[in-house]
Amino acid sequence: MNLNILSELRSAIENDELVVHYQPQYDLKRGRICGVEALTRWPHPRLGLLLPEAFIPLAEQYDLIDRLSYWLLHIVLEQLVKWRHEGIDLPISINVSAINLQDCELHKFISAELQRRSISPQQLRLEITESVLIPRYAEALHVVNCMSKSGTRFAIDDFGAGFSSLQYLKRLPADEIKIDKSFVIDMDKDRKDALIVQSTIDLGHKLGYTVTAEGVESEQTLDLLRQWGCDKAQGFFLEQPLSIEAFLRKLSSSKFALY
Ligand code: G
Ligand code: MN
C-alpha cells in the first residue's frame, strides 16, 4: 500500500499534479494580514485532497522530501516575483523538513534563486519542522546558521509537539515560534491547553521571539490570544488555506482585516 502511494507521489511531483494553497497569517496587534503560509495539497485521484500530514512523513522517510521541497520552492519563488511586479508586499512561509537542511544544497539553491530574481531574503520565510529524527543533526544546525547569517528568517514550527522541543530555542537562530495547533485548537475549552499556550507565549516573548498560534478555530480562542499578547495567528476561524485565485480575489477586496 505504502509503496503504491510512494510511486504515485513520485509521479505526482514529476507531473506537477500537486497544488499549493495559501493560508493567511494575521498580525494580531495591527488586525490585518502579515504573510501567508504556502501549504502543499495532493489532489489524489482515488483518495481525494490529501493534506501534507498524509504524505510528508512518507516523503521524508523514502527520500522524496528534497524533490517535494524544490517543487514547492519553484512555485513560491515565481509567486514572489509576480507579487513584486504587482506591488504586493507579503512574505511567504514554506515548511522545510530538517532533512532538507542536512547539506548545503538547499541553501545554495535559495540564495542563488533569490538573487537571480531580485527577491529580498526577508520575503521567503522558512518554517522548520521535524517529524522524523535527523541523522545528521550537527550538519543541519550548521546550514541553518549559515542561512540565517545570509538573511533567511526561520520559524520553529509545531512548537511543543513531536521533536520540536525546548532544545530548539537554545540552538536554532529562529526569530519566531509557532505554537503547535494541538494545543491551540481546544484551548477555549481545555484549561491545560490554555495554560500551555499562555505560558508558551510568555516564554517566547521573554526569549525575544515573535509568537504565532496556529490552529485558531474559534472567536473565543482568538480573543484569549489577543489578551495574552500573542503576536500572530493563523487558523480556520480566521481563514482556510485558499487557492491562489481565491486568495488574490480576497486580497484585492481587502477582506483580510480583522477589525
Ligand atoms: O505543521 P503546519 O503548521 O505546517 O500545519 C499546517 C497544516 O495545518 C495545514 O495542512 C493546514 O491545512 C492545517 N491547518 C491550518 N489551520 C488549521 C486549523 O485551524 N485547524 C486545523 N485542525 N488544521 C489547520
Ligand atoms: Mn507550518
Image (cartoon, grey):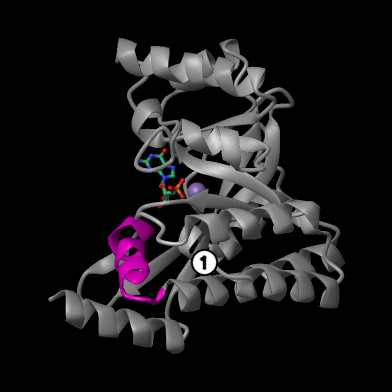
Q: Is residue 174 left or right of residue 88?
A: left
Residue nearer the viewer, 60 or 18: 60
Front one among 98 and 237: 98
Q: Quadrant of the C terminus?
A: top right
Q: Which residue is mark 1?
A: 100
- Which secondary structure is most common in the magenta stretch? helix
Q: Residue at x 33, y 56 (%)?
A: 53
Tell me residue 230's x, y (percent). Answer: 60, 21
Give the residue drawn at x 43%, y 71%: 65
Q: Left or right: where does residue 169 sit relative to residue 115?
A: left
- For label 1, the SS is helix
Looking at the image, can residue 99 be seen? yes
- The range drawn in magenta is 52-64
Label 1: few (<14), some (14–19) or many (≥20) C-alpha neighbours in 10 Å: many
Q: Quick check: is 109 in the magenta stretch?
A: no
Residue 140 sits above or below residue 72 on the image: above
Q: Residue furthest front?
A: 138
Give the image location of residue 173, x and y in percent. 67, 43
Residue 176: percent from left, percent from top: 63, 36
Q: Is residue 104 above or below residue 251?
A: below
Instruction: Assign the N terminus to one quadrant of the image.
Output: bottom left
What's the residue at 76%, 55% (across, down)?
Answer: 123
**Identity of the amino acid at label 1?**
Asn
Q: Residue at the spot x=40%, y=35% of the render? A: 181
